[in-house]
């Protein structure tokens, strides 16, 4: 037997720390290769970490709610030889640490373990039905299902063709074998798992709601946000009836962490390092709305969400071709002009604001762009946006019109030269050929890094975007 430590891995570009949101194992548990052991929250997304070992959990080194830096050990596992693939039926339960091993190198000691850390968690998340984000680049690898009974005890099942995996009794349970972390494989008993996406699980945790006691009203019994809120409200009413005198808090203190912490840091950096200049204009978007209506009735776009945001995004790509100066990054020594467009789309999610981007959007047809926007939106809403989805953006759009706002002055996404915003589209009086007529009017514009572009370039770019919204036929050029 060997003692192996699992340090917090680097789960995305530029991320240096993460918070332990939930442990899915406990000391004494038998764990299988690729089994999800915990859920972490980085500054950008929720991520499930799979085990790079097969063995028995010796110790959880970090408590839930703790933020730890990348490389710090979070778990210790007793394994049957380094990189063992299955738990043995008995034998030694502890051993001296392997010579030369340390806390920062445990899961990287063998080629097998390196492969695991590059090829495992996606299938786990998919099969669990949780829809949570997984480590960048993870794929299938002998998928293991990790489920929880209604009493909270996990049920493990290895897919056909894989090694069997069992669960030892938790620490402190009756029986010496359980207390010492026996490796015996136990029969698997199936039970219905709680179906809930990571943001819903996080909401339940924050509200103190036990998901196993919630009746899901979604498809296949999925627990939805309303289900959790209703359960929390009912519990609150019960507490109030049971306790006549309840002190009402006058303020709430929310720890600055996760996406909110990252957003705060990014906005301060951008606002005080990049000199912003903003330009906006009103637009007659009547023809855009007519175009959207035709696309919705087109058989080519059947089953694809079409909205004015699609035309706005396509207008941005068209305008970038005519003013490539706005698609750039400023550094201390040079201006980097990008000959591709990774189009960022700001998305409000239950976890906060995220800005995933569509890679090489300039190469997409209108239909492909519509599909990409729809997939990006669904992924963000479900809390499955990965760090790689938000990396290397070149220019961004934000649609504040969905909130009923006419316009605002957005702050640049760090490292980008421009961000365009579109306000709500509403019927207003508009002068057409000398006569006042009702037209569908919106306001478009944005903020730009004045270190990279001057007023003439900015004005031309915004005017080009506006011209496409006024006449979508320009996209045929």
Image (tube, rainbow, N blue to C red):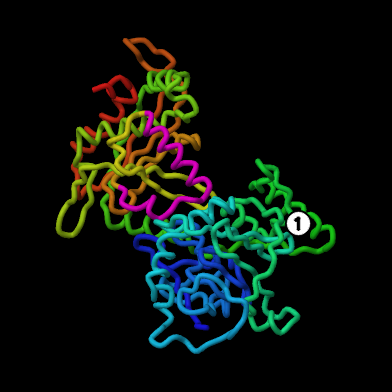
> Residue 340: x, y in percent?
24, 42
Q: Is 344 situated left or right of 76 in this image?
A: left
Left or right: residue 433 compared with residue 1: left
- At x 62%, y 80%, the residue is 90
In the foreground, 13 or 250: 13
Q: Can residue 440 be seen from the camera position used here? A: no
Residue range (magenta): 367-393
Dot 1 alpha-carbon crowd within 10 angstroms: few under 14, some 14 to 19, many 20 or more: few
Q: Residue furthest left?
A: 333
User: Within the image, what quadrant is residue 182 found in?
Assistant: bottom right
Picture coordinates of residue 49, whole percent (x, y): 50, 64
Name the residue at the front extreme.
Answer: 161
Which residue is nearer to you in this view: 117 or 430?
Answer: 117
Instruction: State whether residue 299 appears in this view.
Output: yes
At mark 1, the secondary structure is: helix
Q: Magenta stretch containing residue 3, yes or no?
A: no
The residue singled out by tag 1 in the image is 236
Q: Is residue 49 above or below residue 436?
A: below
Residue drawn 43% across the image and 34% down it: 406
Q: Main secondary structure of the magenta part?
A: helix
**In the rendering, at what x and y percent does residue 330 appear?**
21, 53
377 falls in the magenta region:
yes
Asked if residue 305 is positioned above or below residue 171 in the image, the reply reads above
Number of marks: 1
Q: Is residue 443 above or below residue 120?
A: above
Q: Quadrant of the C terminus?
A: top left
Say left or right for 157 vs 421: right
Q: Quadrant of residue 461?
A: top left
Using the image as rendered, state which of residue 152 and residue 283 is in the foreground.
152
266 vs 216: above or below: below
* Rendering coords of residue 271 (x, y %): 33, 54
- Say which of 296 and 417 sits in front: 296
């Amino acid at each position: 037997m060997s003692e192996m430590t699992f340090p917090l891995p680097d789960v995305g570009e530029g991320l240096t720390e993460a918070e332990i949101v939930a442990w899915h194992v406990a000391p004494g548990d038998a764990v299988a290769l690729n089994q999800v052991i915990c859920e972490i929250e980085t500054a950008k997304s929720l991520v499930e970490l799979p085990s790079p070992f097969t063995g028995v959990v010796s110790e959880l080194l970090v408590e839930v709610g703790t933020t730890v830096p990348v490389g710090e050990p979070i778990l210790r596992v007793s394994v049957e030889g380094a990189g063992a693939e299955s738990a043995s039926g008995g034998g030694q339960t502890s051993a001296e640490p392997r010579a030369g091993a340390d806390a920062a190198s445990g899961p990287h000691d063998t080629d097998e373990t390196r492969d695991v850390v590059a090829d495992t968690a996606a299938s786990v998340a998919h099969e669990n039905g949780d829809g949570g984000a997984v480590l960048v680049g993870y794929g299938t690898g002998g998928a293991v299902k990790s489920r929880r009974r209604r009493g909270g005890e996990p049920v493990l099942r290895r897919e056909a063709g894989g090694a069997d995996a069992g669960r030892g009794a938790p620490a402190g349970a009756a029986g010496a074998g359980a207390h010492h972390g026996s490796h015996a494989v136990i029969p698997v008993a199936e039970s219905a798992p709680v179906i809930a996406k990571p943001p819903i699980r996080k909401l339940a945790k924050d509200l103190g709601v036990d998901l196993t006691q919630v009746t899901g009203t979604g498809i296949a019994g999925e627990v939805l946000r309303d289900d959790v809120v209703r359960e929390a409200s009912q519990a609150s009413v019960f507490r109030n009836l049971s306790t006549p005198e309840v002190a009402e808090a006058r303020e709430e203190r929310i720890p600055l962490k996760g996406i909110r912490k990252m957003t705060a840091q990014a906005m301060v950096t951008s606002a005080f390092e990049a000199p912003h200049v903003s330009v906006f204009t009103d637009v007659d978007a009547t023809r855009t709305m007519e175009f959207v209506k035709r696309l919705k009735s087109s058989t080519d776009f059947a089953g694809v969400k079409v909205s004015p945001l699609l035309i706005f995004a396509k207008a941005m790509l068209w305008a970038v071709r005519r003013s490539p100066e706005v698609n750039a990054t400023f550094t201390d020594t040079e201006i980097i002009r990008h000959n591709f467009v990774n189009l960022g789309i700001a998305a409000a999610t239950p976890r906060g604001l995220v800005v995933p981007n569509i890679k090489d959007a300039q190469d997409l047809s209108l239909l492909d762009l519509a599909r990409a926007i729809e997939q990006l939106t669904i992924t963000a809403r479900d809390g499955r946006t990965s760090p790689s989805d938000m990396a290397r953006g070149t220019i961004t759009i934000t649609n504040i019109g969905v909130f009923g706002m006419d316009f605002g002055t957005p702050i640049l996404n760090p490292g980008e030269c421009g961000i365009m915003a579109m306000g709500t589209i509403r019927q207003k009086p508009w002068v057409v050929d000398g006569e006042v007529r009702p037209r569908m009017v919106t306001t478009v514009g944005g903020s730009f890094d004045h270190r990279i572009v001057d007023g003439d370039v900015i004005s031309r770019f915004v005017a080009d975007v506006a011209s496409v919204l006024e006449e979508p036929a320009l996209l045929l050029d």
